[in-house]
Amino acid sequence: MKLAVCIRQVPSSEARITVSPQTNQVDLKGVDWVISPYDEYALEEALRIRERLGGTVLAVSLGPDRVRNALKTALATGCDSAAHISDPALDGADSYVTAQVLAAFLAREQCDLILCGQKGIDEDMGYVGIALAEFLDLPHVSSVTKLEIGAESRSARAHREIEGATEVIETSLPAVMMAQKGLNEPRYPSLRGMMLAGKKTIRAVTPAELGIESPSLLNRTRVMSATLPPERKAGRIIEGEPREAVRELVRALREDAKVI
């Protein structure tokens, strides 16, 4: 099977995010960049499918030069090849443009299965996988927590959690699957994997090579401004004997916080 994994590089969840007072936009200078955790689930699932059924795994991402670090990590984890789509016109690309460019690239790869994360932990939209499937005219399943592939029947059975139940969806391949937390436990790159990754070449691709001209890369969304959430008030510790503390707690919840 030929599998593709769409990789998104996002600020580390431990990064301290600030908003520039000059631009009212998130200031990302100096933050550490990592593979989005949901994409790690997609990557791990692709590797497990290859281990069971054979084939190859291709990692693809788009963005500035720093994205190559994420692709190197994917190669070290076990991907067979990687492709980096870059162009100045892609700086600040929104989800629509991202899906448009990824679809143009993957349409030429003729993959049996495309996996991506349910969402990026930065913008939290969950849009790219759905739009990617639409551009490619392929079926898709989101929030996948279990995936079974029938190689001979060229079919997939995806499980996803809904309120109070598990939904099971069957579809033909090729298809797009969006990985949710719980699908698997991602592995870490091994020393051997990191050494092998150093010998692999990341293919460089431009939108023009995919038949997409810069004027067509028009964002459909624009961030007007960004603000940090308001600071929380300090908590209050109620001391004293349990009986009196409980009485004071109930009074504070009823009269001060007005939640009961």
Image (cartoon, grey):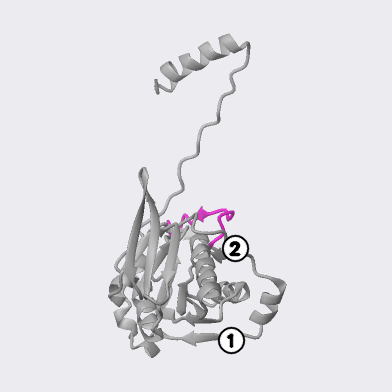
Mark 1, Cα crowd under 10 Å, few <14 / some 14-19 / many 20+, is few
Q: Magenta stretch?
A: 11-24
Q: Amino acid at mark 2?
A: Asp
**Mark 2: few/some/many CA within 10 Å (<14, 14-19, 20+):** some
Can residue 94 be seen? no
- Tell me the CA gap for discs 1 and 2: 24 Å
Name the element at disc 1: loop
- Inspect the image, locate mark 1, and give the three-letter code of the amino acid beneath it: Thr
Query: Is residue 20 one of those drawn in magenta?
Result: yes
Q: Which residue corresponds to mark 2?
A: 32
* Quarter placement of the C terminus: top left
Q: Is residue 199 left or right of residue 216?
A: right
Residue 205 percent coordinates (x, y): 46, 86
Q: Residue furthest right?
A: 191
- Residue carrying label 1: 201
Residue 168 sits in quarter: bottom left
162 lies above or below 45:
above
In the image: residue 202, left or right of residue 89? right
